[in-house]
Image (cartoon, rainbow, N blue to C red):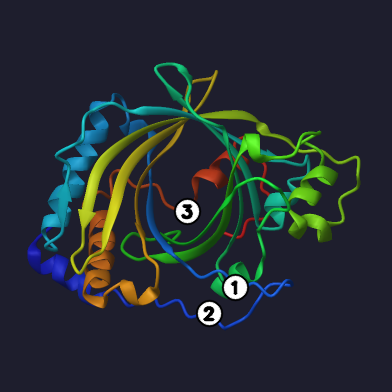
Amino acid sequence: MSAKSSSDAAAQAKPARVELAAGAYSDGHPLDDVQYLECKLILKPDRFTSAETFLEYGALVSQTAREFGISLDDRDVVLAPELREVLFLDTGDNSLYNHAFILRRRICYKQGFLAGDPEIVFKFRHSDAQTAANLDVRPNIAGKYRIKFKAEVLPLKDEVGGYRLLFSHNVEIGLSQLPEGDRTSMATLSEIFPCLAGMGKSATDHVELVNQTIVEEVLQDLGVLDFGKGVTAKANIALWRERGMYQPLCGEFAFQAKFKRRDDLHEKAMERMRGFFITLQQAGRDWLSLGTTKTGMVYRLRGNAPQAHE
């Protein structure tokens, strides 16, 4: 794409300010604020035929970034994809997903063996930032946990060249930090995550693998994007496939910036980021898959159509 076209894309990209009303949770703790900005592009799985394909898309990322004066530092990048296992858990009637919750377990492997503590991710995801902020995802556990509140930038559902926002209020917990007991029981989960108590599930309800599917994720780092004004973002690309069936589901390119205060996201850097995100869609439209998320794809594998808040 020409430099002129890239400039036009940047000029047409409108700011995406996130302004939250002041508030607090029931114990007086102030509402969590957005501290991560993550941009995602879902990619067609059939393009991924070998590990080298990851770097092929990385070259497109680097070329598009240069048009906006953005550098991609890939000096430490080696072609060595990581292998992770992702499991989504829900009730038989998809009650969690229908209420905008996602419960996921992620396991990392190194040279074929378990690496570190398996990670539990519990998130509430919604298109409205205030709704996402108001939901207290803090767990009722004695162990350690980490809260992440993200603004997720995705393409439009049916058109290349724009973006939409989802807000993901997450808590990450090492499996070893959870209390013992039946962790598949909704009664137990409602004790761990008090925000689930109002869902009205009975003590006999349990969660199970969504669509009996284990996802194998092949993840490759692409480097660090530098948007200027101190705004940097780690970039990676991944392939999701169904373990056992070896059925490719989708690819994903993503980059994420972390900040302490919204003022840290300098407007000039944000303009570059928005223009880059839109132009990359256009430059790589043959790679792009619109209208879904990775989670939504897993939930619809067997033809199910749960209510989504995506």
Q: Amino acid at mark 2?
A: Leu
* Residue 287 position in % (x across, y down): 30, 43
Q: How many marks?
A: 3
Query: Image quadrant of residue 103?
Result: top right
Element at label 3: loop
Q: Amino acid at mark 3?
A: Gly
- Lower position in the chain sequence, tag 2 or tag 1: 2
Can residue 260 be seen here? The reply is yes
Which residue is at a point 53% across and 79% down the rendered structure image? Answer: 20
> Could you tell me how far apart the alpha carbons at marks 2 and 3 are, in whole angstroms?
27 Å
| Residue tagged 2 | 20
Q: Amino acid at mark 1?
A: Leu
**Viewer-side label of 3, 1:** 1
Residue at the limit of the structure toward the left, as seen here = 3
Query: Image quadrant of residue 232?
Result: bottom left
* Residue 31 circle label: 1
CA neighbours of label 1 inside 10 A, class few (<14), some (14 to 19), many (20+): some
Which residue is at a point 66% across and 66% down the rendered structure image? Answer: 135
- Lower position in the chain sequence, tag 2 or tag 3: 2
Residues tagged 2 and 1 counted as in contact (Cβ below 8 A): yes
* Residue 41 circle label: none
Element at label 2: loop
Give the vertical position of 260 relative to 90 (above or below). below
Instruction: Work out whether residue 113 or residue 152 is closer to the camera in this orientation and state it.
Output: 113
| Quadrant position of the N terminus in the picture | bottom left
| Residue tagged 3 | 291
